[in-house]
Amino acid sequence: MSQYRIEVRVKPRPGLLDPQGKAIHHSLNSLGWEGVNDVSVGKAIYIEIDADSADTALATVEVMCRKLLANPVTEDFEVSVVDEMELTSS
Amino acid sequence: MTNPTAMQVPPREGDPEITPEIVADHGLTPEEYEKVLKIMGRDPTFTELGVFSAMWSEHCGYKNSKRLLRLLPTQAPWVIQGPGENAGVIDVGDGYALAFKIESHNHPSAVEPYQGAATGVGGILRDIFTMGARPVAVLDSLRFGDLDSGRVRYLFAGVVNGVGDYGNCVGIPNVGGEVQFDRGYEGNPIVNAMCLGLMRHEELITAAATGNGAPLMAVGARTGRDGIHGATFASEELSEDSDESSRPQVQVGDPFTEKLLLEASLELIASGAISGIQDMGAAGITSSASEMAGRGGSGVELEMTDVPVREEGMTPYEILLSESQERMLVVAHPGREDEVREILEKWELEAAVIGQVTDDGKFRILENGNVVGDIPALPLTDGCPTYEREGIESEQVVALREMDLTEHMTAEGDLTKDFLSLLRSPNVASKRWIYEQYDTTVRTGTAVRPGGDSGVIRIRGTSRAIAATTDCNGRLVYLEPRTGAMAAVAEAARNLVCVGALPTAITNNLNFGNPLKTHIYYQLREAVLGMREACSAFETPVTGGNVSLFNETDGKAIYPTPVIGMVGVIDDISKIIRHAFNSAGDDIVLLGTNSGELGGSEYLYVTYKLVAGHPPSVDLEAERLLQQAVLKMNHEEVLNSAHDCSEGGLAAAIAECALGNGETPLGVSAEVDEDLAPIVSLFGESHGRIIVSTSPENTERVLAIAALYDVPAKRIGTVTEMASGFSIKVRSGSVQARMTDVAEAYFDSIPNIMDAPTGSEA
Amino acid sequence: MKVAVITFPGSNCDYDLFKAAQQVGGDAQFIWHRERGLESYDAVLLPGGFSYGDYLRAGAIARMSPIMEDVIEFAKTGRPVLGICNGFQILCESGLLPGALMHNISLKFESKDVMLRVDRSDTMFTKDYTTGQVLRIPIAHGEGNYGADDETLKALEDQGRVVFRYVDRDGEPSDEANPNGSWNNIAGITNETGNVLGMMPHPERAMEKLLGSTDGLALFTSMAGSIQPS
């Protein structure tokens, strides 16, 4: 059993309007940053979870994403393991 | 202009071939397709088929409702603009005109409640400011299933959040609305939003494309692939397989851009640089351009490659049918395009010339100069086939209506307990949880906030104010559509007179199931007929509205819900009245009588989960006299409060008067001597009743005015201090409760349901 | 009194502030965020609303607007700068006021009347109130939960820079009376020199009996009375 730190990146679906990204993009341009082609805004969620393996941990978090963390209609998600800590059995 | 015929257009490379399957997928029947062929004189291209499909959808073409809608009264001396424009407009005095309209976003909200509701508010705001009016208030009329379902709580929370976030950000106060929870709306929430806007008469602008060669400009947000075929989608039933793949891409609202677009549009109209403006709403560029051409009796030519897009590689089909939000189509005066661009640029938005008005009566689409679509414009907008169908009442509904309720009426039980259960029902309980998420005071015009009988917005610089309300009890319409629709109009009018406003005009939102089914068409027809009778009786013409059909999931339709959005005018803002009792010692007077029905009541739903029986009858003449009597009493300033009696019946209505906004509740000591069972006396929902309070020295005058108008009136009790509690005695029984218990039942119910740890789930 | 009301893209209380300034005799002007030059004004008002949609963080993009450089210079001259709601958020983002406004503890937009206690009646914004006076003023915000690091909060209290606090009807700052979770029930603060006030509640919406309260009026009369005509 290990403890995994999982990073969930939730991002707006490509093609959908991203008002936040659009407003920030506009603002970056008006502040003089050239060559900014696109901005989109998502969020990162960090979850620490006990699991037998990295695969199990990721699979569990993916279910969480589908059920709660991401809106399936408007958002996509990616999950990855950022840290692993072995648990000492007690 | 003679009927132009379509020119030959070669198929566009990459577009699918037209097959019967593709035609069916576009929601056109074989007969309708025949009509397309006749208009075109040849097979349509894929692009043209998409255009027909959108324009002839129920959402744009009103094909199943148009013939019925023609039955509604639309004229009155104060009507400046009736149905057919972006919004209706009425004169409200002192040189001011009021634009107002209600619109539905039911289907999008069922799929994605937050964005669906948000974009619904966005759309109705644009309908108002494209008339030249500044939006001054919104109301929302919502229906959901029972709140014991997690999915329903998720939808409810999401919709409220979406309505709130959009209106709050744009800065339009929410002044009222209503919500009903009933299993009849389980799979199909209803989200109707109404907006009111004020302007000077001379600021009115309409949406017609006139002037050969006048440039057409797209202004505001860019066009993406959002909601392609939303109009067709809104005209179909939802089913289990309305999954992601078959869904059109959900539209995402951007209220920040909307606010900029609002300011830019009003500035454009004021500049005189444009002659017409219309929202690109349902069916996007297609409907806005063809409708503007239709109204102007002209043609339009649009170059697809000039439309500012958000995504690469969009086809003409996609550009024409995109429902990206926060966009407008503008007809500029030739030579003034730069002025338009400058105004848009100031508001950090784009404007691009995408075509021009023509005089050949065609709706013509170009791609890089090549014609990819060429459709006679008038038949496209006006040639949409309309249907009058057979309507037959459902046997099941007849059985429910004829159910014998004697046992339910005479049941023995604890009346106080029943009363508190009723107050706790989300249909009666305080809706504070909702409207405390809405900015109600921005623009410093809100004289009566949500929670009263109607919202009231003053007209700055005058002594006048506008009142608005939305009403409809779908259960009553379900049980007896004609009576139920009349009841909705009557309730709306009562709600207006209860703040001191004269009922003036109506916008309606007809939310129904699939009209191809005979029992649904019956509901639709009967409801329109009921509305017509009531609107004629009250002299409140219908100046526009919206139709949302096919509100069904897996074959189960919603209750027929013709929401009435009614507006009224208050001449003297110093005479606005509110629903709350305000002094202990005041007399409580009941105007109107109890006609003794219990059918369709909240009591039956709370106690037996039953929607049955004859709904209370509606006496339109009595309603009209009641309205006049209350306005007369208010004019003479003899009323301290007035409140309509509706869901929950007399006991709940009196409790609402005693509680007010909860800050300083008062007590009640009343006795109602009616020859009726206690349950019917206390909880029956007879129409035509208003509870007023008056200083004792004025009671005689109140009763005298009532007599003058033949309105039954009786002093039924006294307002007391809070500590004296709540007491209503009826012939054989009573309700007796402490005000703290009454307040807790009424105010804490929805928060307890919604803010509990398990309050929401996807 | 010549008053500048700054309009950012997405401001929606600019008109209300304009009217409030007029009501106390002010000569109010709208200044678009891309304009420059505030030297000739006696007071600067930053209105509520959703500048840039409150995308990224409330006030974060607006404080980059050209006019904000002038607002900072104006504040240094000791003349009054008032930021209400989104204006308060912009003042915090721009560094004219310390701390930050976070999401309400309920995670919901909160729109209702609240009770405010005047803790300082010796500022240029509150001299027409009395200390301890309880006011009824509307709030309407989603991000009004005031917080800062311990040192800043201590300095604010020690220096008496908390001007308004959320209280109950008896004037006590209870948790129930706190609509957004603000630390120590803080509703409004000033800078060290006392000429920049940020507050979440909307006094400009409490100027007439018709609208439910006149308790905001004295804030604007105080400001008008503190200004030496230039």
Image: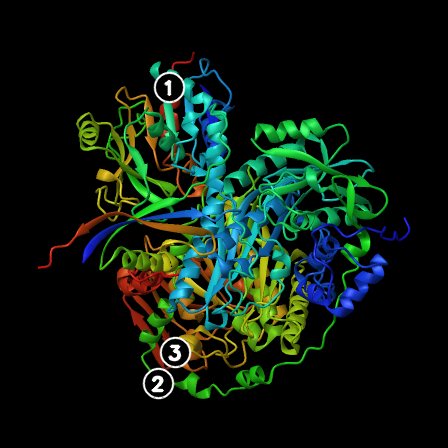
The vertical placement of C229 against B122, above or below, is: above
- Circle 3 residue: B607
Q: Please, what is the three-letter code of the amino acid marked with disc 2?
A: Glu
Residue B566 in the image, given as x and y percentages of width and height: 59, 56
For label 2, the crowd category at 10 Å Cα-Cα, with few meaning under 14, some 14 to 19 and many 20 or more, is few
- Circle 1 residue: C72
Q: Earlier in the sequence, mark 2 or mark 3?
A: 2
Distance between the Cα atoms at labels 3 and 1? 63 Å
Q: Please, what is the three-letter code of the amino acid marked with disc 1?
A: Ile
- Nearest to the eye among marks 1 and 2: give it: 1
Distance between the Cα atoms at labels 2 and 3? 13 Å
Distance between the Cα atoms at labels 1 and 2? 73 Å
- Circle 2 residue: B412
Occupied quadrant, residue B270: top right
For label 1, the crowd category at 10 Å Cα-Cα, with few meaning under 14, some 14 to 19 and many 20 or more, is some
Residue B735 in the image, given as x and y percentages of width and height: 33, 73
Q: Nearer the viewer, residue A58 or B329?
A: A58
> Secondary structure beneath disc 3?
helix
